[in-house]
Amino acid sequence: MRNPPPCKFLQVFAIHFSHYGRRECVRFTDKNDRGCGVFDRLRKLFGGKQAPTSQALPNGIPTAEQRRGGIAYDPNLVPALKNDHKVLVQLFGQIGEAADRGDFKQVPQMLMAFKVHLEGHLIAENVRFYNYVENSMQGDVENTALIRSFRREMNAIARGVVDFVKKYQLPEFDADARTEFMSDYRTVGGLLGQRIEREETSLYPLYSA
């Protein structure tokens, strides 16, 4: 069986995080876009075949008209986003547990489930959190720069996870593929953990009425 192709995103992804604040990802949107461009690109990147899942989207994905009209403050949003983090960590951990047991048959399907949940979380952050905070922070140069750096980082995370999931949609895993999967899994897990920690300590406190 051919080994899966190397995951080039991992090197780029690691550079982005290790040099946080010094290297930037491609900007998806401009200041007048209200996140619509990012939203459309996220849906295209993830495939849009399954409805994204997130507690922060209780009424589904806001329509384009709602996004253009602005998003109101919601005291339940940050708790819902933090709950998404718990679900994502749990799902990612279950993937690692299956791999540790040698149960690689379940891994492709579990990766797809993780991707769907991550898509929902990123869309919720984009259309409900970032739009609101960027508008409310107008004039605050320092915090606006922080918000935009987090928002741009979504590009690296989304592309990285999609590449990781696609790479391991394999009918079977030989010894080499299993070894490489565990290496990639640890890298992605570490980077996602860093992202979650920074969001909850530095980003989410900026959300206020």
Image (cartoon, helix red, strand yellow):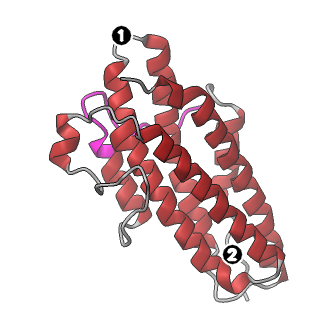
Nearest-to-viewer mark from 2 and 1: 1
Residue 19 appears at what percent x and percent y? 69, 31
Tell me the quadrant of the picture where the N terminus can be found.
bottom right
Quadrant location of residue 3? bottom right
Q: Amino acid at mark 2?
A: Pro
Residue 99 appears at what percent x and percent y? 77, 75
Which residue is rendered at x = 42% and y = 36% of the image?
27
Query: Is 32 placed left or right of 177 in the picture?
Result: left
- Badge 1 local density, few (<14 within 10 Å), some, or many (20+)? few
Q: Front-most of 30 and 62?
A: 62
Numbered range of the magenta stretch = 23-37
Quadrant location of residue 52? bottom left
Which residue is rendered at x = 61% and y = 26% of the image?
21
Q: Amino acid at mark 1?
A: Gly
Whether residue 26 is visible, yes or no, is no
Which residue is rendered at x = 49% and y = 13% of the image?
142
The residue tagged 1 is 139
Q: Is residue 25 magenta?
A: yes
Whether residue 191 is visible, yes or no, is yes
The residue tagged 2 is 4
Which residue is rendered at x = 47% and y = 27% of the image?
147
